[in-house]
Amino acid sequence: MKALKLHNHLQMNSTCIENDFIDNYMARANGEYVKVYLLLLRHLQNPYTTVTISTIADCLENTEKDILRALKYWEKEGLISLTYNSNNEIDSINIGGMPTELKNESTVEELPSITKSTPIAIPEKLTEEKSSTKNSNIEQFKNRKELKSLLFIAEQYLGKTLSATDIEAITYFYDNLHFSAELVEYLIEYCVENGHKSIHYIQKVALAWSEENITTVEEARNSSKFYNKNCYSILNAFGIKGRSAAAPELAYIKKWTEEYGFTLDLIIEACNRTMAKLHQPSFEYTDSILKKWITSNVHHLADLQRLDSAHRQTVIHRRAETRPVVKNKFNNFEGRTYDYDSLEKQLLNQ
């Protein structure tokens, strides 16, 4: 196929974007952040315009805090630098300064930058609450190429821009729990698919996996299948449908299967007896039944049948012992006793 010839007729009234930005930054950044950066480049070409945070927010139909978050994001990425006045308010924005890490990795021939060290004055005074103290681990985490990609994936699953708390939690999974990037990604995917986007819930699942010594996605997937099957069966026995197990309910299920060591059929039987007794689900009552079975050495359904048979015999015996004697006109006198041998001798002698 014949090669196509491309001709550029855009000489003036155009905005130049570095290839390094397209190759290494644009894909993993939030779309709204990309818009802010492009708008900065657009106004950079016209030094006679005055740019403010509010004008950028109005142009992009965002809030001023959204714009500030985007500026801080690009500052962390190293594409811009912010200067502040004595009141800790943004005074100017300097565009340029690609990180040396990505410059060394990039194989694309770089064009001369036209955006370096060009200040954009922002005269409007804005106040913003200082962000909470950032752990140095967060900065190290964000500087790693592998985990930068993981942050982007987490944002897509959670459907929001990650907060400092979210980043700290994901950093903890990676650095302290020693989860691989693939395992952290599956952790978030698993929780979101089950309807839980709270970082606190994700932390609980991560800690549970750590206690089970889960280190690979395959081990986590097998563990998830096991608990999903048990949870579905137990909730179904209670008549609960259309939702997953809540955290307290899941804690009971783990106790019954791991701490007590009961098989699923015995747990289902305890649930059935709970419903027959109370006519409503009660994890507390089921737990009391299973505790009694532990003391009675019940490990199989056959052991339970033996226990039920012994219980019925005990009940029958107690009822017989405690049955009261009712007196009426047929049994309100003392019974007579006879010595039949003596009576027979008397008749023979006569």
Image (cartoon, rainbow, N blue to C red):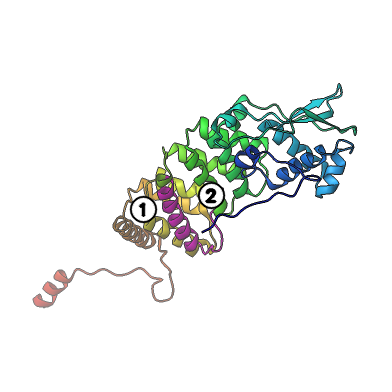
Q: Is residue 300 left or right of residue 29?
A: left
Q: Quadrant of residue 233?
A: bottom left
Residue 83, how many percent across, how many down? 80, 26
Whether the magenta-drawn stretch holds residue 143 is answered as: no
The residue positioned 51% from the left and 53% from the top of the image is 283
Task: Give the camera-side residue of 107 and 172.
Answer: 107
Q: Is residue 132 left or right of residue 291?
A: right
The residue positioned 43% from the left and 55% from the top of the image is 230
The mark closer to the camera, 1 or 2, is: 2
Instruction: Report crowding for label 2: few under 14, some 14 to 19, many 20 or more residues within 10 A (C-alpha).
Output: some
Residue 9, how many percent across, how many down? 74, 50
Residue segment shown in magenta: 220-248
Q: Quadrant of residue 167?
A: top right
Residue 105, how many percent across, how many down? 54, 32
- State the residue position of label 2: 189
The residue positioned 59% from the left and 30% from the top of the image is 103
Identify which amino acid the numbered label 1 is placed on.
Answer: Thr
Residue farthest to the top?
Answer: 86
Q: Quadrant of residue 98?
A: top right
Q: Please tell me the numbered disc located at residue 152.
A: none
Whether the magenta-drawn stretch holds residue 238 is answered as: yes
- State the residue position of label 1: 263
